Image: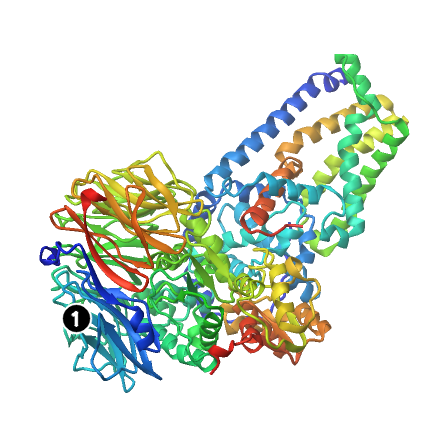
């Protein structure tokens, strides 16, 4: 079992993740061509300006208005992306199989980052359950996406601390990570892929076409 | 057509009038107009408080001023018309002599090609009509409004887009049942339509066509009261074939793209982002149109084949040379107006370019341009001769050897005739 | 997903009520899918697949804020209750649903694009509401007064059923009014080759003709070579853009620009209106295949800014007392004229008091986007839906609100009256005409 999830399934997950992502981006771009105005309205300068104002915390008026959300959201997303990439255990695995490695996070830091992701998930879950606007637009899929996101980190945390049956938890952890990878292109987790494009378009339309700003 | 053979093509330069004198003579002088033969220049002038007259060359229209004058227009035969008011009523004045009838309102003067017919839209007692040489249409229904009208070259057929049915306020059903129609020489077509646009008469005066709107997003072409079988998402103004008035061509929109259709059938198989201003060559064998194969990339397509050069702003209506071999168009690219012939840009960009005239063999394009607020004549991309404060479109003589250039220099209005070969 | 709980006082709208009874399920399904498949593309698909349902857009919306944070007014809810359902059910929705869609898109959203600016992804919710409007328009599900206005555009090429003679007659009359300020002023009709074509929106000749007299005097003082057309094409407004009837929208915009091309002007200067700027600068040209207007379009704010900063108009006497301003969404947030507006306000006002939030972050007047044009049946909801605007103005302590936009002007007058703010609502030109210096040689 372990061999399967940590061997062929990893390959499958990454192939689906990368292939699926490329396909979804291609699908988005080719469909955008159908609307003749989309590409002529794009501008690199205004795309970048928009991105700069929305990937740096507190660099736009709305983020400053909602400091708690901004802090949680940034901490969550940074930890979500960087923890798995720079986790020592992951880097060692890569080194063992392929003989490539890179810098890794100190274990204690990675542990805290994992906790931040889990805490972020709890925060988002709490909002979904209590904020009337969010609650009204939440359905099963939103909880599922939250679970898909949280599970690799919860299981990873348990595995790292060897709290339960290590081997089983490890298999569940790997599976959870693979599910998340596969889910990214085909669920609304694809906001990870599309963020750059939606921002670039709105920034371009607001800046290049309408001579205003979007922050 | 007006016969320009009788114009003076011999006198090389004539000082027709010194308009600087007008400035001292009158309280205010409005923008000038000239007669088609260039022999007269006229301006509305203010002679006192609420008193206006028209100055033509060295004279004015009689001693008695009018309360208001506007829309001075020379007819093709050289008579000067204007719309005037006396005691709060309006009428047409022709060479200073007013029509007998007075109207609640009168506007939109138009002429037959020879200038013998003078027409205008009039309103009397709340009823709208077209008045042709002082005779107002007798229409069986009271026209609620006239949006616009057209006149055939021979002046015998006049057709108007008119509201034939009274519409109550916010009566959506009534509107969609049709309140607009075409009225030809006072007689409305049998059917009413939601809207009528793009009314046109064939050159021989026999056929009349327009775009009509059948429903919210449903448009078609109606020719002599009979609609095409085909309907489209949108249409633009139809144009008759110059010699075969049974043929009519129009841009139509299908599936989000524009196509060219003749008598209901798509004739250009390529769809465009935009397609406007279809124009027949003089013998009707070719069609040119302004097209955008891609968003914000404009060019001319001749018989469906776009030029390779494109322009990023817009195009005006293309025109053929008299022999039909060349096509010229005024294009705008990056803020500059350009003259383009068969896909090649001629000369520099200008602040403005006026519709060009071709030499008979199509070798030379002659046109008015504006640069730094002054006007000049350009030929094949190069400015020729002086700059003027005011300039009118150069006119090529009927034999194709000479060009009439009329312009104002230092307040003096000159009429010049130059050899085409000298340009 | 559970349906949104919507509490509204019932509104009778003859067009929506009547047309809804005529709709068939087949017709609805066909139109919904036709619009979504053929008229939208990657944008709508990406927006729907990117929205993470975070609800951050709610805070942007004056409807939501003014209605005590009623969830049903949140932008994301408006998408949920329209587009999401249409996509999920592949167009198999009923007439009551389409009616609610029209109410949401035409009467409860001003397509002001503030929510787009507050979405972390820059999802343009207003665009999605325009898609909903398009579907409704093709099903004839447009509120009565808005549809009537669109019919006026289609039939007369102006917003107010103004007939050709009434237009010219009004200009000739207002020329005389302008001469009351400056005797030698002229309103030049059909002057080919003038520098500027001045265009206005339908309500000016119909209800606010004095604005045409004002501009006649201002143009003379500023010594502008200008003209106005005596034909259709004079109206720069466009409610067809807002009903979703894009074919009529395009015809109106085309005529506007072809009129300017016929008159051979260098640019069009337009009166104080926001939506008209949007239609003429952006939506119309885009539909026509023009990247930008074929003749440059200058909004009144830019025009007055140029006149004042260049000294072509000098200010003799600044308006007294605290005066505030309304930032029209379509020329501030969506055209970037906020700084220029502040410059001219300071130039003519002794004590200009700004609003908070301001500039591109300002709240919509709640009348724009065609919402005031849906008419009297919907007025109560509209005014209730902008309580925060009344509170915002009250905080300024101003005696006058300047609104360089017709829809803002009418909408804010309603708010001033309903919330008893006791403030005057004026166009910028009305302040300018009193404040500007009329040189001696031009004085009566």
Residue most extreme to the left:
B6
Q: Position of residue A21 (x, y in %)?
A: 61, 30
Q: Which residue is mark 1?
A: B186
Name the foreground residue: C265 vs C377. Answer: C265
The residue tagged with tag 1: helix, strand or loop?
loop
- For image coordinates 12% across by 54% down, the residue present is B10
Name the foreground residue: B361 vs C100. Answer: B361
Q: Is residue C369 above or below residue C394?
A: above
Name the foreground residue: A191 vs C274. Answer: C274
Q: Is residue B17 above or below residue C80?
A: below
Give the left or right position of residue A130, taking residue B330 as reference: right
Q: Position of residue A68 (x, y in %)?
A: 81, 50
The picture quadrant where one finds residue C183 is bottom left
Name the foreground residue: A198 vs C218. Answer: C218
- For image coordinates 67% across by 52% down, the residue present is C118
Q: Position of residue A62 (x, y in %)?
A: 72, 53
Residue B127 appears in view: no
Colour scheme used in the picture?
A: rainbow
């Amino acid at each position: 079992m372990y061999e399967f999830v940590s061997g062929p399934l990893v390959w499958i997950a990454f192939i689906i993740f990368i292939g699926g992502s490329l396909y979804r981006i291609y699908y988005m771009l080719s469909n955008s061509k159908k609307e003749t105005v989309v590409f002529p309205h794009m501008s690199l300068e205004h795309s970048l300006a928009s991105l700069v104002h929305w990937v740096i915390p507190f660099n736009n008026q709305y983020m400053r208005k909602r400091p708690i959300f901004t802090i949680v959201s940034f901490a969550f997303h940074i930890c979500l992306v960087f923890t798995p990439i720079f986790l020592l255990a992951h880097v060692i695995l890569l080194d063992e199989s392929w003989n490539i490695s890179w810098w890794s996070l100190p274990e204690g830091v990675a542990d805290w980052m994992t906790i931040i992701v889990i805490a972020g998930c709890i925060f988002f879950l709490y909002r979904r359950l209590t904020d009337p606007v969010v609650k009204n637009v939440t359905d099963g899929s939103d909880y599922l996406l939250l679970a898909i996101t949280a599970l690799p980190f919860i299981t990873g945390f348990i595995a790292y601390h060897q709290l339960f049956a290590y081997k089983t938890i490890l298999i569940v952890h790997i599976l959870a990570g693979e599910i998340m990878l596969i889910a990214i292109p085909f669920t609304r987790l694809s906001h990870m892929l599309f963020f750059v494009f939606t921002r670039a378009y709105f920034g371009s339309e607001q800046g290049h076409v309408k001579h205003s700003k979007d922050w | 057509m007006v016969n320009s053979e009788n114009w003076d093509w011999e006198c090389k330069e004539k000082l027709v009038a010194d308009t600087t004198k007008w400035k001292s003579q009158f309280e205010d002088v409005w923008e000038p107009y000239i007669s088609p033969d260039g022999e007269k220049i006229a301006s509305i002038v203010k002679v006192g408080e609420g008193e206006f007259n028209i100055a033509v060359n060295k004279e004015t229209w009689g001693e008695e001023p009018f309360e208001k004058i506007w829309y001075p227009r020379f007819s093709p035969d050289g008579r000067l018309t204007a719309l005037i008011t006396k005691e709060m009523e309006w009428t047409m004045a022709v060479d200073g002599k007013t029509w007998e009838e007075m109207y609640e309102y009168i506007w939109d003067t138009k002429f037959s090609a020879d200038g013998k017919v003078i027409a205008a839209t009039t309103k009397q007692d709340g009823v709208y009509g077209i008045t042709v040489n002082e005779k107002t249409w007798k229409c069986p229904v009271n026209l609620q409004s006239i949006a616009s009208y057209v006149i055939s070259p021979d002046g015998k057929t006049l057709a108007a887009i008119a509201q034939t049915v009274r519409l109550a306020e916010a009566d959506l059903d009534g509107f969609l049942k049709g309140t607009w129609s075409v009225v030809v020489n006072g007689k409305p077509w049998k059917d009413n339509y939601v809207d009528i646009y793009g009314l046109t008469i064939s050159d021989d005066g026999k056929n009349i066509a327009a775009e009509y709107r059948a429903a919210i997003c449903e448009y078609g072409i109606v020719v002599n009261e009979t609609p095409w079988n085909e309907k489209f998402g949108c249409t633009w103004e139809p144009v008759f074939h110059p010699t075969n008035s049974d043929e009519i061509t129009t841009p139509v929109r299908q599936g989000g793209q524009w196509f060219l259709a003749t008598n209901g059938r798509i004739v250009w198989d390529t769809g465009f982002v935009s397609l406007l201003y279809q124009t027949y060559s003089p013998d009707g064998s070719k069609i040119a149109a302004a097209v955008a194969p891609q968003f914000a990339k404009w060019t001319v397509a001749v018989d469906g084949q776009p030029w390779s050069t494109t322009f990023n702003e817009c195009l005006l209506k293309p025109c053929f040379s008299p022999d039909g071999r060349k096509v010229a168009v005024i294009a705008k690219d990056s803020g500059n107006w350009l003259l383009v012939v068969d896909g090649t840009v001629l000369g520099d960009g200008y602040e403005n370019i006026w519709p060009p005239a071709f030499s008979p063999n199509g070798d030379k394009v002659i046109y008015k341009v504006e640069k730094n607020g002054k006007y000049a004549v350009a030929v094949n991309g190069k400015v020729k001769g002086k700059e003027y404060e005011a300039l009118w479109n150069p006119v090529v003589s009927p034999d194709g050897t000479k060009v009439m250039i009329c312009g104002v220099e230092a307040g003096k209005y000159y009429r010049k005739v130059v050899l085409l070969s000298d340009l | 997903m559970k349906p949104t709980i919507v509490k509204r006082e019932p509104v009778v709208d003859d067009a929506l009520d009547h047309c809804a009874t005529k709709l068939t399920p087949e017709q609805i399904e066909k139109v919904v899918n036709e619009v979504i498949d053929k008229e939208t593309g990657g944008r709508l698909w990406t927006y729907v697949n990117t929205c993470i349902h975070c609800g951050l857009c709610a805070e942007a919306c004056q409807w939501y804020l003014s209605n005590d944070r009623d969830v049903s007014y949140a932008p994301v809810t408006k998408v949920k209750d329209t587009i999401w359902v249409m996509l999920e059910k592949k167009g198999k929705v009923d007439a009551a649903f389409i009616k609610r869609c029209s109410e949401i898109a035409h009467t409860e959203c001003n397509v002001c694009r503030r929510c787009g600016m507050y979405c972390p992804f820059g999802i343009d919710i207003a665009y999605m509401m325009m898609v909903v409007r398009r579907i409704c328009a093709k099903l004839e599900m447009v509120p009565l007064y808005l549809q009537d206005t669109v019919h006026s555009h289609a039939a007369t090429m102006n917003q107010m059923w103004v007939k050709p003679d009434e237009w010219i007659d009004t200009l000739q009359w207002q020329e005389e009014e302008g001469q009351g300020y400056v005797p030698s002023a002229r309103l030049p009709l059909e002057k080919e080759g003038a520098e500027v074509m001045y265009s206005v929106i339908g309500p000016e000749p119909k209800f606010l003709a004095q604005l045409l007299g004002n501009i006649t005097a201002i143009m003379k003082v500023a010594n502008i070579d200008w003209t106005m057309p005596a034909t259709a094409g004079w109206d720069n407004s466009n409610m067809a853009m807002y009903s979703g009837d894009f074919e009529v929208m395009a015809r109106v915009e085309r005529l506007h620009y072809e009129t300017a091309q016929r008159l051979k002007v260098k640019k069009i200067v337009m009166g104080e209106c926001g939506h008209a700027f949007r239609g003429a600068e952006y939506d119309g040209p885009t539909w026509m295949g023009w990247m930008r207007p074929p003749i440059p379009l200058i909004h009144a704010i830019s025009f007055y800014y140029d006149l004042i900063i260049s000294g072509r108009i000098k200010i003799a006497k600044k308006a007294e007392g605290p005066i505030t301003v309304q930032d029209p969404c379509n020329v501030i947030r969506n055209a970037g004229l906020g700084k220029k507006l502040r410059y001219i306000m300071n130039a003519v006002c002794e004590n200009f008091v700004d609003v908070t939030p301001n500039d591109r972050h300002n709240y919509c007047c709640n009348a724009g986007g065609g919402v005031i044009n849906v008419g009297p049946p919907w007025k109560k909801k509209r005014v209730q839906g902008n309580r925060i605007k009344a509170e915002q103005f009250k905080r300024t302590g101003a005696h006058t609100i300047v609104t360089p936009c017709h829809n803002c002007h009418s909408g804010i007058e309603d708010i001033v009256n309903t919330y008893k703010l006791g403030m005057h609502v004026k166009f910028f030109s009305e302040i300018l005409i009193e404040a500007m210096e009329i040189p001696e040689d031009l004085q009566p």
